[in-house]
Image: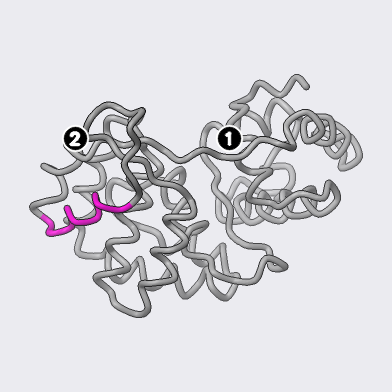
Amino acid sequence: MASQEDMLERLRRLVEVHRGRRQAPVRFRPATWRPWLEPHGVAHVLGLGATDTTLTPGDRVISRDDLAAARQALGDDPEALRDLFVAVMIWGAGTTNGRAPRYTSVALGDARLPHVLEATRRAVRVGELTRAYTAFTVRGVRRSFFTKWFATIDDRDAECERALILDARVFRSLNALGWSSREAASTRRWTARYAAYVGAVHEWAGSLGVTAAWLEWLMFDLNGHVEA
């Protein structure tokens, strides 16, 4: 595995090239989602985000800022918590993950979902990411999406090691940079590997003068193509 110094040097070159870039809102197609959400009474979530005249008629866009605003507004209402989860699934899928509407419907039909959403929110908000990782056991939702839920629901101060997204695209960039979550955590257990990843990205971001969320997004966007 690349040393800390090597990782910082490789990341520094990427940051210098891409520093001015920002994550764009994600396009989604309400007509695709509606049949899967209406039976669960959550089709109103499709009104989040905004319309854009440059899109295919009927499509909308949703951003990370939209998710943050929805999180701030939800309070302790369990129904609102479920709505936010659906919004995260929509944002995470965009128009490229054709299976996400079906998997979201499967999750909404899982009786464990309300408890899991509340339990993982409590764990994330006190920084217990390994507990949250262990607790997210809902049909249809795997790491790429439930870590998006963690990152969205984490409302702690920026100085904390807030939860980050870990999906296949981020992994490709980490691997291409020579970093291994298994070696960093000294175990194969994914709970520990996720916590090691979050800690590492926050450490790198602090050294490079960027936010951990932006650095995570950059690795997602590069999708393994890390040649500066």
> Disc 2 versus disc 1: distance between alpha carbons?
25 Å
The magenta span reads: 40-48
Farthest residue in the right direction?
5
| Between 111 and 95, the one nearer to me in the picture | 95
Q: Which amino acid does label 2 sit on?
A: Thr
Q: Residue at x 63, y 56 (%)?
A: 195
Position of the N terminus, as image quadrant, is top right
Q: Is the magenta stretch mostly helix, strand or loop?
A: helix
Query: Which quarter of the image is occupied by the C terminus?
Result: top right
Residue drawn at (72%, 67%) of the image:
159
Q: What element carries label 2?
A: helix
Disc 1 packing (10 Å; few <14; some 14–19; many ≥20) = many
Residue 220's label in the rendered image is 1
Image coords of residue 126 (percent x, y): 57, 75
Instruction: Name the side, left or right, on which 198 lies relative to 117.
Output: right
Q: Is 175 a magenta residue?
A: no
Identify residue for label 2.
32
Give the image location of residue 94, x and y in percent: 36, 36
Give the residue at the far front of this rendering.
53
In which quadrant of the rendered view does residue 91 lie? top left
> Callout 2 environment at 10 Å: few (<14), some (14 to 19), or many (20+)?
few
Disc nearer the start of the sequence (2/1):
2
- Asked which quadrant contains residue 158, the reply is bottom right
